[in-house]
């Protein structure tokens, strides 16, 4: 498994991280088997995956609780990331969505972050978080200056409760505000070979400011595994319902792409999942992209993890880019 530095934090983590969104088991993904999720987390570490990402809002606390159980007695073996800035237990903030009987709101005020960190520490059964990420940014109807948010995060860092700061789902101006008011070590953005819009927004900024770029949903929630054929039953859930590539008119194009890359899969002796993960990790400057892949079963993490060990030839990286640029 390739390793990489996380920003300027001094933290070294696996180039492929395990995402625990689906482990929450809410309506976004459907029910999970907690025991299997814990076994998958342990198997991830055996395979060299050290970075584990969760958030309070995943399962409304359930994902953090499961991760906490998995890490009990093994905490130092993992680089643990969780998030702040989304609340469903208060009536303050900008509404992000309504699901599972609650209203989820954006709120990254310092006093709310102070509450969130304590709850996460309890649920994760730890006394520190390696990477603490602001999940969603403030909106004009409930403004929170990034200087205030970053000030609170820097205080948590001084207190030893977090080791590094991250931000997710932001724009260039917000990125620049974060680096102006503290040390930003990681940004987490939706990025895949089928959705490359954030390249122009962030790759240059990440290089300039030594901030790691973490790609979430690099497999487009499973469609880029090559496992879906026309007529294949799909457990959609809310998460997949938002992905256009699962639509019946687009699925044949995905199948054709998988067929086109079959010789590459044979060349590298890997399934399409691993080929896509390896391509994603090779983007940017080739050493600054962390690939976050979801898993909640042992077979899923085994398939995902090996993508972090494949070195693609530059010519193949370029040819795959040409294919997806023509495709999408």
Image (cartoon, rainbow, N blue to C red):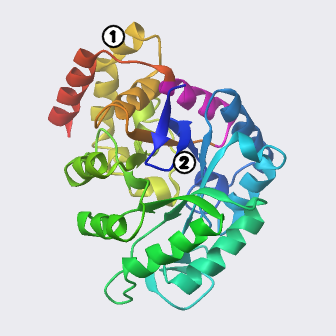
The N terminus lies in quadrant: top right
Secondary structure state at the residue bearing disc 2: loop
Q: Position of residue 250 (x, y in %)?
A: 28, 41
Q: Main secondary structure of the magenta part?
A: helix
Q: Can residue 101 be seen in this snapshot?
A: no
Residue 43 picture quarter: top right
Residue drawn at (40%, 24%), measured in percent from left and top? 275
| Numbered circle sitting on residue 263 | 1
**3D distance between C-alphas at marks 2 and 1:** 29 Å
Dot 2 or dot 1, earlier in sequence:
2
Please state if 11 lies on the left or on the right of 193 as rendered: right
Q: Nearer the viewer, mark 2 or mark 1?
A: 1
Q: Is 86 situated above or below 15?
A: below
Q: Position of residue 189 (x, y in %)?
A: 38, 54
Query: Which residues are drawn in magenta?
Result: 296-308
Q: Is 75 situated above or below 285?
A: below
Residue drawn at (48%, 66%), measured in percent from left and top? 135
Q: Nearer the viewer, residue 69 or 157?
A: 157
Q: Can residue 104 be seen in this snapshot?
A: yes
Residue bearing mark 2: 235
* Label 1 neighbour load within 10 Å: few <14, some 14-19, many 20+: few
């Amino acid at each position: 498994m390739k390793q990489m530095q996380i920003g300027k934090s001094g933290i070294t983590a696996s180039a492929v991280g395990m995402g625990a969104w689906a482990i929450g088991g809410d309506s976004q993904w459907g029910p999970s088997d907690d025991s299997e999720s814990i076994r998958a987390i342990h198997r991830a570490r055996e395979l060299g995956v050290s970075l584990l990402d969760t958030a309070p809002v995943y399962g409304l606390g359930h994902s953090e609780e499961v991760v906490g159980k998995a890490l009990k007695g093994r905490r130092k073996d993992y680089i643990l990331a969780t998030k702040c800035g989304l609340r469903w237990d208060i009536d303050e903030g900008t509404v992000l969505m309504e699901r599972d009987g609650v209203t989820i709101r954006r709120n990254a005020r310092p006093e709310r972050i102070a509450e969130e960190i304590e709850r996460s520490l309890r649920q994760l059964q730890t006394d520190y978080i390696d990477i603490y990420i602001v999940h969603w940014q403030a909106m004009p109807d409930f403004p929170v200056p990034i200087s205030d948010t970053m000030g609170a995060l820097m205080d948590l860092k001084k207190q030893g409760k977090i080791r590094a700061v991250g931000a997710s789902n932001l724009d260039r101006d917000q990125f620049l505000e974060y680096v102006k008011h503290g040390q930003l070590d990681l940004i987490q953005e939706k990025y895949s070979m089928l959705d490359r819009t954030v390249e122009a927004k962030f790759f240059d900024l990440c290089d300039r400011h030594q901030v790691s770029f973490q790609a979430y949903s690099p497999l487009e929630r499973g469609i880029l595994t090559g496992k879906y054929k026309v007529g294949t039953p799909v457990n959609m859930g809310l998460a997949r319902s938002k992905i256009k590539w699962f639509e019946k008119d687009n699925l044949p194009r995905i199948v054709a792409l998988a067929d086109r890359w079959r010789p590459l899969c044979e060349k590298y002796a890997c399934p399409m999942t691993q080929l896509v993960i390896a391509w994603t990790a090779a983007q940017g400057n080739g050493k600054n992209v962390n690939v976050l892949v979801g898993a909640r079963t042992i077979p899923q993490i085994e398939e995902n993890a090996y993508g972090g060990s494949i070195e693609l030839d530059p010519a193949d990286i370029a040819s795959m880019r040409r294919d997806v640029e023509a495709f999408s």
